[in-house]
Image (cartoon, rainbow, N blue to C red):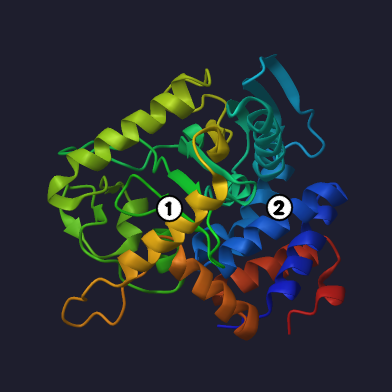
Amino acid sequence: MPIVQADRLRNIADTLLRAAGASAEEAETVSRLSIGANLAGHDSHGIMLLPTYIDRIERGHIVPGAPFEIEKETDTTLVINGNWGFGYSVSERAMKMTIEKAQKHNVAATTIYQQSHVGRVGAYPIMAAKAGMIGMMTADSGRSPKTVAPFGGAEAKLGTNPISFSIPSNMDGTFYIDMATSAVAAGKVKLAMARGADIPEGWVVDKNGQATTNPADLYDGGVLLPLGGPEGHKGYALSSIVEIFSGILTGLGFGVEKTGKHNDGVFMAAFKVEAFRSLDTFKSEIDEFASYLKSTKTQAGVDEVFYPGELEHIREIERLRDGCVIEDTTWAKLKEVAEKYNVASELSFD
């Protein structure tokens, strides 16, 4: 598998997106955030998705230059219709506006509907943390065909329905969580299949409701399980709440999008720390809390305890230095798209 530097990956993504019809601004946003996922170690949400996005542009499921429409607004809330634009661009702009409202009014929240895939959900609450706020975001997995069974079920009724929180601190690596409410994000199963790897037992049951380690079984009538294993009722409950925040509250409803388009419903919020206490004091105590967690005595076979978000920070440092491993199937698909749009020679996939 090729190892590719991040700036080269961003250039490939940017060039392919512009060739497919994205504006320079849209292409920059999507390439920056998607390669950011590769850098954080979440390859399932990285450049491997570019061919999918371009296919959706070609089919009219993503509309480059779509109007960013504010349908309803108060001092502390927004309702945004993305009109099938790039989810990365719509959600980043929406989070910026949410932060601006929270700076004036201490708290703010936004719902978004009719936008394409937003990528790694954690990228947006991190924006709030950098502005001295606690950031939150939930997403309902696009109302695409469902992949996750309710606890005890063998039929998909929910999406992976991620949730993310990000906390301001003085540390180099942001303190945050970004997690699917399923046992694993569906993209990680797809990534394992692309790399010819097995998956851990407890991620998927096959079409007969039997545990499996074969990632292909998910795409042959199988389903993902909710987060929690034997205590999966907890992940199931969390997923249901995310569906309410990101599907029903946004006006999308639940179930599958009738148009067949990937429709990421999103709820996001920002909470200004200084509305509650000194930001400097809060950030210092988060630093101390992280150190407190890291000082934990480790279990047998464990070298170190990490604070939430630390591993992603470490991976980013390593991958900026060493490059990102890209599976052969993804590299081949990127080259195929480049050839289709006559830009392969300038991108040099050899």
Q: Is 37 above or below relative to 226?
A: below
The amino acid beneath tag 1 is Ile
x and y, in percent, of residue 225 in the image: 25, 47
Q: Is 81 above or below relative to 292?
A: above
Q: Nearer the viewer, residue 14 or 210?
A: 14
Mark identifier at residue 78: none
Outermost left residue: 230
The amino acid beneath tag 2 is Val
Horizontal arrangement in the rendering, residue 231 relative to residue 11 (left or right): left
Seen at 70% across and 51% down, the residue is: 54
Check disc 1 and report its element: helix, strand or loop.
strand
- State which quadrant residue 59 falls in: top right
x and y, in percent, of residue 298 in the image: 21, 76
Q: Distance between the residues labelled 2 and 1?
A: 21 Å
x and y, in percent, of residue 324 in the image: 59, 77
Mark 2 surroundings within 10 Å by alpha-carbon count, few (fewer than 14), some (14 through 19), many (20 or more): many
Seen at 60% across and 83% down, the residue is: 2
Check disc 2 and report its element: helix, strand or loop.
helix
Seen at 75% across and 36% down, the residue is: 63
x and y, in percent, of residue 64 in the image: 79, 40
Seen at 41% across and 66% down, the residue is: 193
**Residue designated by label 1:** 177
Horizontal arrangement in the rendering, residue 81 relative to residue 221 (left or right): right
Q: Is 317 above or below relative to 277?
A: below
Mark 1 surroundings within 10 Å by alpha-carbon count, few (fewer than 14), some (14 through 19), many (20 or more): many
**Residue designated by label 2:** 30
